[in-house]
């Protein structure tokens, strides 16, 4: 089953076959008025079925587009959070640079080596924690950016599919109109 088909509904080709069969059946040598009216109703019923099928598909696509637009808003919010996290990363890097300078200062001037080493170890642990936070923030930023790009691509795909469905509906309406006119002319010929 294609993505465009909906379970429990026929494809557009089935509708053409039904219209074609009803047209052939209505070409009997001396059709009655009831059989001609049944053929015209069949075309109208098939057109109505096609219209409701495509309206359902368009409504489904519009709902998916709305969901994707909501996801895009969420991705924009995630981008804002990412920018805030970038500011925090810069601040943490500055603090990290300051901590490193403090470490060098204490190592250079400290008389009590044991106390200096203990402080250096604590600051190194803090640096590792800050580096881990920085790596986590970067990984989160990359994931958010990737998700936003995927959402944009999916939104564009759904927009393209919706446009194609609208074009198909227009074509189907023209075909149904032509068939209805043809049946009307045939009916006039047989009644005339």
Image (tube, rainbow, N blue to C red):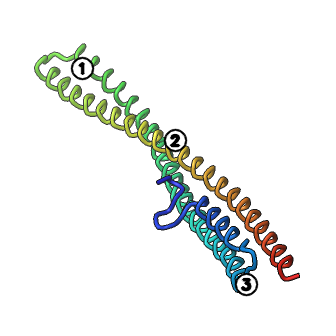
Q: Are marks 1 and 2 in contact (CB under 8 Å)?
A: no
* Residue position for label 3: 32
Q: CA distance from mark 1 to mark 2?
A: 47 Å
**Residue 57 falls in which quadrant of the image?**
bottom right
Foreground mark, 3 or 2? Answer: 3
> Element at badge 2?
helix
Percent position (x, y) of residue 40? 72, 77
Image-based side of 186 in relation to 166, left or right: right
Q: Residue placed at 68% from the left, 57% from the top?
A: 168
The crowding category of the residue bearing disc 1, from other C-alpha atoms within 10 Å (few below 14, some 14 to 19, many at least 20), is some
Foreground mark, 1 or 2? Answer: 2
Q: Residue placed at 81% from the left, 73% from the top?
A: 186
Question: Which of disc 3 and disc 1 is earlier in sequence?
Answer: 3
Q: Are marks 3 and 2 in contact (CB under 8 Å)?
A: no
* Residue position for label 2: 149
Q: CA distance from mark 3 to mark 2?
A: 62 Å
> Element at badge 1?
helix
> Element at badge 3?
loop
Image-based side of 26 in relation to 143, left or right: right
């Amino acid at each position: 089953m294609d993505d465009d088909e909906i379970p429990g509904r026929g494809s557009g080709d089935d509708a053409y076959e039904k219209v074609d069969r009803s047209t052939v059946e209505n070409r009997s040598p001396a059709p009655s008025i009831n059989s001609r009216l049944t053929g015209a109703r069949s075309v109208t019923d098939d057109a109505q079925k096609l219209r409701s099928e495509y309206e359902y598909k368009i409504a489904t696509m519009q709902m998916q587009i709305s969901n994707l637009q909501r996801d895009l808003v969420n991705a924009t919010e995630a981008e804002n959070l990412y920018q805030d996290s970038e500011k925090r990363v810069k601040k943490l890097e500055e603090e990290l640079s300051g901590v490193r300078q403090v470490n060098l200062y204490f190592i250079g001037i400290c008389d009590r080596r044991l106390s200096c080493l203990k402080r250096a170890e604590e600051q190194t642990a803090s640096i590792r924690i800050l580096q881990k936070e920085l790596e986590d923030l970067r990984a989160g930023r990359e994931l958010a950016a990737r998700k936003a790009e995927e959402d944009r691509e999916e939104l564009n795909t759904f927009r393209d599919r919706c446009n194609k469905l609208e074009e198909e509906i227009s074509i189907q309406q023209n075909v149904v109109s032509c068939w209805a006119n043809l049946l009307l002319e045939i009916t006039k010929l047989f009644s005339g």
